Image (cartoon, rainbow, N blue to C red):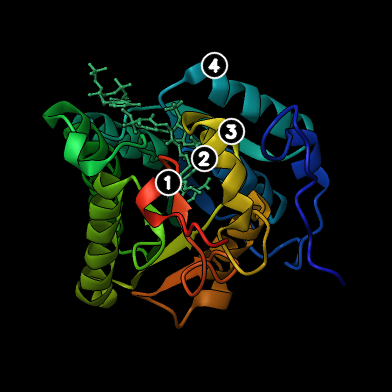
Amino acid sequence: MADDHMPQRSDRLGLTDDELALHRTVFASDALKDMVIVLSGGAGGIGRAIAWLFARLGAHLVVVGRNQGKLSALTSNMTAKGLQASACAADIRDADAVARLFDTVWQTHGRVDGLINSAGGQFPQPAIDFSVKGWNAVIDTNLNGTWYMMQTAARHWRDNKQPGNIVNIVVVTTHGLYGIAHSIAARSGVIGLSRSVAVEWAPLNIRVNCVAPGAIETEGWNVYAPEARAAYPRSNPMMRAGSPWNVAEACAYLASPSGAFVTGETLTVDGGGQLWGETWTTGKPAYFIDKDT
Ligand SMILES: CCC/C=C/C(=O)SCCNC(=O)CCNC(=O)[C@H](O)C(C)(C)COP(=O)([O-])OP(=O)([O-])OC[C@H]1O[C@@H](n2cnc3c(N)ncnc32)[C@H](O)[C@@H]1OP(=O)([O-])[O-]
Ligand SMILES: NC(=O)C1=CN([C@@H]2O[C@H](COP(=O)(O)OP(=O)(O)OC[C@H]3O[C@@H](n4cnc5c(N)ncnc54)[C@H](OP(=O)(O)O)[C@@H]3O)[C@@H](O)[C@H]2O)C=CC1
């Protein structure tokens, strides 16, 4: 079977709910049967693919974000297809809101089996120009917010003597992604945290992994200028953007029994971009442009 390619369209970015409801998957339809999964950023481009895939594999998805309207629109579309999903608005930067969120989910379902942290993002800017407020906004969202979710989930698993697993969506921090140094710093923190608590929490039967997507076409790309965005599909040796579905299936591998012996790992889903290619979110500076090509 050929790899799936993102349809190249100019009208919108990413996959629609109708497409996500039907997209082929390699996973068995009961791979996540009866699992309760908390998914932050669930109404975003990658989050929605995760929500649909996981619910189609039998899980109940609790989707989290700041915008109740976007969350409810998604869960209505999912429940209309017979899938199990509910919406819970919360800002992951607010540790008290995160605590209330997990209390509510445990009260409602009596369990949580997995946490996927897909909430995140940044704005493109040369690092030398970051304001204190801009820096803090990105660190708070991507490092602190992700940590509040991880720690709160883990405390519930410990206190209820239940196993759990966490997948954090990060960015590729090792090579080729420029103009978002605040996010590279935050996500490097998340990767380090994940490796550290993968060991500390192994006695609690909690696995912790990361997925690092490369250029994945979603509406999240709207934060970048069209000229910068136009170069993203050429940022890896496959010379194309990835699909949110590719990221969702990587998460399913890690969150289901297929990942039972994997912890502390970062699974990179970038078409080889960490080995060859570059992404300038701010547009490529003249200094780096080879005038002979
Ligand atoms: C292939 C490529 C890789 C792609 C990777 C992806 O992740 S794809 C997409 C993934 N999705 C996304 O990335 C989603 C889009 N990103 C976001 O939602 C935000 O960037 C956020 C994550 C920081 C949220 O922060 P928030 O809710 O607090 O929002 P806020 O708006 O209130 O900003 C707070 C402060 O930040 C500063 N500042 C903000 N923008 C700019 C700018 N353009 N310029 C300069 N500075 C900027 C500014 O100081 C502002 O305060 P001010 O001066 O206005 O009082
Ligand atoms: N698309 C890509 O090419 C890549 C994406 N990534 C990362 O993958 C993740 C998902 O990306 P993608 O789906 O494309 O981006 P989107 O912008 O489409 O989705 C991000 C989601 O995060 C939610 N969110 C942001 N801040 C908060 C917050 N403080 N509290 C709760 N929810 C929040 C947003 O919902 P709301 O605004 O309603 O709160 C939104 O639904 C992000 O971490 C992103 O940085 C990494 C590499 C590449």
> What's the residue at 78%, 43% (across, down)?
8
Disc nearest the viewer among 4 and 3: 3
Kindly identify the amino acid type of the residue bearing the numbered disc 4: Gly
Q: Is residue 140 visible?
A: yes
Q: Earlier in the sequence, mark 1 or mark 2?
A: 1
The residue that mark 2 highlights is: 228
Residue positioned 38% across, 40% down in the render: 120
| Mark 2 vs mark 3, CA separation in Å | 14 Å
Crowding around mark 1 (Cα neighbors within 10 Å: few <14, some 14 to 19, many 20+) is: few
Within-10-Å neighbours for mark 2: few <14, some 14–19, many 20+: some
Q: Dot 1 corresponds to which residue?
A: 110
In the visual, does 181 lie left or right of 106?
left
Mark 4 CB within 8 Å of ligand 2: no
Furthest-bottom residue in this view:
261
- Mark 3: which secondary structure? helix
Q: Quadrant of the C terminus?
A: bottom right
Q: CA distance from mark 3 to mark 1?
A: 34 Å
Q: Residues within 10 Å of mark 4 (few under 14, many from 20)?
A: few
Residue lying at 58% horizontally and 48% vertically, measured from the top left: 231
In the figure, is residue 132 to the left or right of 280?
left
**109 relative to 107 in the view: left or right:** right
